[in-house]
Amino acid sequence: RGIQRKVVRVSNRRAMCMFEYVYFARPDSVINGVCVYDARFRLGRNLARTWPRKADMVIPVPDSGRTAASGYAQELGLPLVEGLMKNRYVWRTFIMPGQEARDLSVRLKLNPVKSVIKGKEVVLIDDTIVRGTTMRRIVRLLRSGGARRIHVGISCPPVVSSCYMGIDFPTRRELIASRKNVEEIRRYIRADSLAYQTLEGLVEGIGIAKSELCLACLTKEYPLEKTANFALLERELGTKR
């Protein structure tokens, strides 16, 4: 009788979603004391240190790859060139509901600047490859614009598992890195070479301790214990951890 007090769960662990720093947040945001622009710049720099390419230019995928591309280009002393022009009235592609809509979005969203890329060897920088379909179309666009060789660098490690905590990711079976290795993905997107950020490079670039980040979509190690709710989500999504 009277007032009853129940504590459902107590945890002192912070697990900040790494995807906020890599993709979702505005570059001028400051999250937990970390400037997102600075974090993305460091991610590009770290990628350049582990995967330096000799090329004529660095091209960002606008807008998501721009800051990392700046870090990559500056680290290697390569020119940063806007070789893809963006229609700013088209939505982000990986959260669009159907493949036809995503394909149409890429065609409407980006256009190559042929006078800039014709006959050139380019490094194309983006933050992530999720399904692989968007990057495949972007590589095709650059080739149609006359690019001689295309190297694709990704500032985040491969996304291999679904998010059960709020990010609208595809199901695990739709994530290309859960089914293919790097060489198989390279062949699928038809790039001349492909490299991902290392997990160590990601953590160092963000500037927050690994123990305080949620990296579950990269490592399959979730910050919460697997519960009945996770199992229900897996059944609904048609995927298994």
Image (cartoon, grey):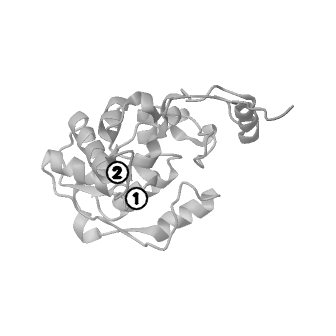
The residue indicated by pointer 1 is 26
Q: Secondary structure at mark 1?
A: loop
The residue indicated by pointer 2 is 36
Q: Secondary structure at mark 2?
A: helix
Residue 142 in percent (x, y) is at 35, 60
Which residue is at the front of the view, 154 or 10?
A: 10
Residue at x 48% of width, y 74% of height: 89
Which quadrant does the N terminus fall into? top right
Above or below: residue 170 compared with residue 66: above
Q: Quadrant of residue 81?
A: bottom left
Residue at x 39% of width, y 45% of height: 32
Question: In the orientation shown, which residue stands out farthest toward the right?
Answer: 1
Residue 190 visible to an observer of this rendering: no
Q: Is residue 215 left or right of residue 46?
A: right
Report, in whole angstroms, how far the alpha carbon at label 2 lies from the one at label 1.
Answer: 7 Å
Residue 183 in percent (x, y) is at 41, 34
As shown in the figure, which amino acid type bears the numbered disc 2? Val
Total count of labels: 2
Residue 96 visible to an observer of this rendering: yes
Disc assigned to residue 123? none
- 2 or 1: tag closer to the N-terminus: 1
Residue 187 in percent (x, y) is at 43, 41
Dot 2: within a 10 Å radius of its alpha carbon, few (fewer than 14), some, or many (20 or more) residues?
many
Residue at x 56% of width, y 60% of height: 102
